[in-house]
Image: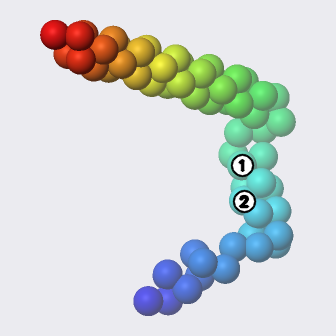
């Protein structure tokens, strides 16, 4: 129960602490590289989702015509 309460109360000091820990672990030079990788991963996921939706709408349209 204590963990749930602590996770629900994330504020500015906790965010600053998390950022400081990330800077210490990865260093200032690695963070942009990590963010680029994260951004490209999100972009690939969105593209895959759009392609899947397009295929579903095509199959639904075929089923309606038949």
Question: Which type of secondary structure does the marked residue at label 1 adopt?
Answer: helix
| Image: 18 above or below 49 | below
| Image: 6 above or below 61 | below
**Residue, x 62% and y 29% (percent of image)?**
38
Picture quadrant of residue 60: top left
Which quadrant of the rendered structure holds the C terminus? Answer: top left
For this view, does 9 lie left or right of residue 44? right
The answer to whether any part of residue 57 appears in the image is yes
**Residue, x 44% and y 89% (percent of image)?**
1
- Residue 58 in percent (x, y) is at 33, 12
| Residue identifier under label 2 | 18
- Residue 41 in percent (x, y) is at 56, 24
For this view, does 11 lie left or right of residue 41? right
For this view, does 53 lie left or right of residue 35? left
Mark 2–mark 1 CB contact (< 8 Å): yes
**Residue, x 78% and y 46% (percent of image)?**
23
Question: Which type of secondary structure does the marked residue at label 2 adopt?
Answer: helix
Classed neighbour count for the residue bearing mark 2: other residues with Cα under 10 Å, few (<14), some (14–19), many (≥20) = few
Residue 22 shows which numbered tag? 1
For this view, does 59 lie left or right of residue 41? left
């Amino acid at each position: 129960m204590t963990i749930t309460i602590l996770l629900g109360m994330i504020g500015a000091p906790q965010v600053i602490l998390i950022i400081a820990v990330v800077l210490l672990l990865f260093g200032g030079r690695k963070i942009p590289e990590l963010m680029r990788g994260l951004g490209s991963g999100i972009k690939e996921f969105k593209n895959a989702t759009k392609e899947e939706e397009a295929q579903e709408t095509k199959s639904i349209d075929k089923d309606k015509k038949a």
